[in-house]
Image (cartoon, helix red, strand yellow):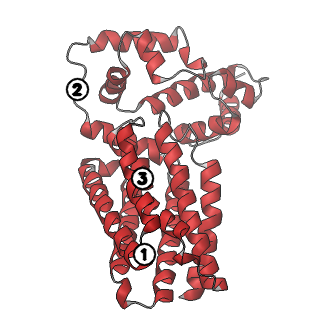
Amino acid sequence: MLTIAILLSGFSIFSALILAFSHFRSINYPEQTQTRFMGVVLVLTLAGLQLIHFVYLQLGLSFIHSGMYQILLFAVAPAFYLFSKPLLKGPDHFQASHLKHALPVIAGYWLPISIALPMAFIIGAGYLLWLSHSIYALREQRSRFHLELTMLGMAFMIALAVLIVGLSLPNLDEKLFFSLYASAIGGAFILINLAINLSPRLPTKITEAASETYATTTLSNVDCDASLHKLTSLMTVDRVYENNELDLQTLASQIDLSSHQLSELINTRLGKGFSRYMREQRVDAAKSMLLAESSASVLSVGLSVGFTSQSNFYDAFREITDMTPGKFRKIGSISTPE
């Protein structure tokens, strides 16, 4: 058990650093600044815990009894809450009321370790109940991302197991407890990496599903057909998607709608979220250019239709067509008669 815990601690540290610098980008979390920031805070907090677990289990250095460890311990649950709330409940800009989540973190520094550990897990249980309720509310959307929800459920079970072990700490050997805790965090990192690799657009999919679940209509006084016609015109005639800085609010203002109204219009009438809609518009335009302008490089095509980088273009093109832009051009040139 000790060897597994040490290996998973090391894996968690490197995995957290990779996630912090590569995953939490605007393309994965469009218009979710708080979620991106808190995601980085969350994985770095877990990395800090795992680093302390590693030096304790491998080197015998007892930083687990330090105030810094207790700060990190109390920070995990609030960081996860502030990361996941905008995904599950819609955009949530920073408010002064959010500072209340820092109170346990500050108090945790001063508590004796014998009180701090069980108290941190009790507070974590409260956040866990909120998460379970939020996930249950998405049950109607489970057919859209069954595999991802399964892995999320597994992560939830790991968190529940950690809670049970944490509350049983007085009856457990200290080294065994921290071995189990480090292994649980490592297991959660494995699930996170699997989910991201199997479904790179998972955050966007969850946000879209949540918005459909919780939405109350904003279109009561809107001529939806006329608005859709104007939206189509902006895409096909004005080609507004070529502006790589185009966002929901800017596009909505051009149709005389609020951002919430345009988001609901696209969701309810077109069956997709804004980000997916924009990727489809850009990929469709790129498909035409790839075949019509055979001398143009793939990168120049992607940039000209509004993508900000080659990687963003390739990811979106593969997501929508199940092939790379180069393969699409090759197949198209073979099937097109001279």
Q: Pointer 3: residues within 10 angstroms few (<14), some, or many (20+)?
A: some
Q: Which of the numbered marks, if any, corresponds to residue 112?
A: 1
User: Which of the two marks, 2 or 3, is nearer to us in this view?
Assistant: 3
Residues at circles 2 and 1 in contact by the CB criterion of under 8 Å: no
Q: Which of the numbered marks, if any, corresponds to residue 102?
A: 3
In the figure, is residue 320 to the left or right of 291? Answer: left
Where does the image place residue 326, in percent across and percent down from the top left?
71, 37
Q: CA distance from mark 2 to mark 1?
A: 50 Å
Q: Residue at x 49, y 48 (%)?
A: 38
Give the mark nearer the N terminus: 2 vs 1: 1
In the figure, is residue 256 to the left or right of 246? Answer: left
Q: Residue at x 47, y 77 (%)?
A: 181
Q: Residue at x 51, y 88 (%)?
A: 175
- Read off the residue under disc 2: 217
Give the mark nearer the N terminus: 1 vs 3: 3
Identify the amino acid type marked 1.
Pro
Q: CA distance from mark 1 to mark 3?
A: 18 Å
Where does the image place residue 154, in percent across and percent down from the top left?
38, 67
Residues at circles 1 and 3 in contact by the CB criterion of under 8 Å: no
Quarter-wise, where is residue 214 in the image? top left
Identify the amino acid type marked 3.
Ala
Q: CA distance from mark 2 to mark 3?
A: 34 Å
Q: Pointer 1: residues within 10 angstroms few (<14), some, or many (20+)?
A: few
Where does the image place residue 203, in percent across and percent down from the top left?
45, 45
Q: Residue at x 60, y 18 (%)?
A: 242
- In the rendered image, the vertical position of residue 194 relative to residue 217, given as above or below: below
